[in-house]
Amino acid sequence: MAPLGLTDADALSDRLLFAIPKKGRLYDKCLNLLAGADIQFRRHARLDVCLVLNHPIALVFLPASDIPSFVGKGNVDLGITGHDVILEAEMEEHVTEVLRLNFGKCALQVQVPEHGPIKNVEELAGKRVVTSFEVLAGKYFKEIDERLGLTGEEGKEKTKIEYVGGSVEAACSLGLADGIVDLVESGDTMRAAGLHAIATLLDTEAVLIKSTRPKPNRPPALESLISLVTSRIAGVIAASKYVVCQYNVLRDNLPAASSLTPGRRAPTISPLEEAGWVAVSVMVEKKRIADIMDGLVKIGAQDIFTFTLDNCRV
């Protein structure tokens, strides 16, 4: 297939347009998600548009910060970006968050030098704050300024929000700011810069979004395709959260076992050839599986196994 350029409008007119972050912390996770949903494509020479091979979909690779606007204005049909990016772009009324994707989790936090004099956001108010999130930081400190009576008059200066596109964590050590507002994932970068968090503006993660703008002329087949893509991605996300747990247990101990492993709806229970015993198969949260297996051992369950899921529909 020949490479597709952004000017090939005719090739895109009958396709669902799906915006994907072109780089950064969400890019690789999105590629894994598309593979799990069996959305097959070849991206030639890192071009920003490519056709999906097995569905009438075109993937559009954009900066994550641009995706809410493209989706909200109806230029593309679906997109993956961060919840924080939607709020920073002030597009929350123009897009619908269809799914939270269980990756890209981090927190937008106020940070100050760990050994500095500022201990809370009230002490930072009225001083200099550097951030890549001007809108969210501005709204946050506007409320604090108003609460503290910082009106901008002499002696009552408002908090000064200054934009920096990258390396925000260096602003304090360079004397550019008294504090910053930035995303924190593991906290390693924050600690390496000698900073610590004193407040959290919001917790965020990657989300699948679609436009709230009506599209009366959109073919019904593309509406159905949106539902199909959403369902497949939801299956991949669910599979990442759960494992299948199978075990054998005395029927008399089944109520206690079921309380440990209630499943999403109910466990599957089958009688064994040995009288008084049953086999149980059930979905359990991956993060709880070690504690659940320990609990099953305590009530006499045997032959306890877990199986990972590649995909599912729940």
Image (cartoon, rainbow, N blue to C red):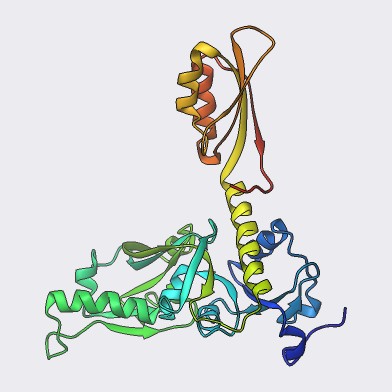
Q: Is residue 252 left or right of residue 140?
A: right
Horizontal and vertical percent position of residue 55:
76, 69
Compared to residue 253, the image places residue 286 above or below, namely below
Query: Can the viewer see residue 10 in this picture?
Result: yes
Q: Is residue 54 left or right of residue 168?
A: right
Compared to residue 268, the image places residue 34 above or below, namely below
Q: Quadrant of the N terminus?
A: bottom right
Horizontal and vertical percent position of residue 16:
67, 76
**Which residue corresponds to the image point at 48% horizontal and 67% vertical from the top-left?**
97
Where, by quadrant of the figure, is residue 66 drawn? Answer: bottom right
Q: Nearest the camera: 223 or 166?
A: 223
**Which residue corresponds to the image point at 13% horizontal and 75% vertical from the top-left?**
148
**Which residue corresponds to the image point at 47% horizontal and 75% vertical from the top-left?**
95
Horizontal and vertical percent position of residue 298:
49, 16
Q: Is residue 302 left or right of residue 188?
A: right
**Which residue corresponds to the image point at 45% horizontal and 79% vertical from the top-left?**
94
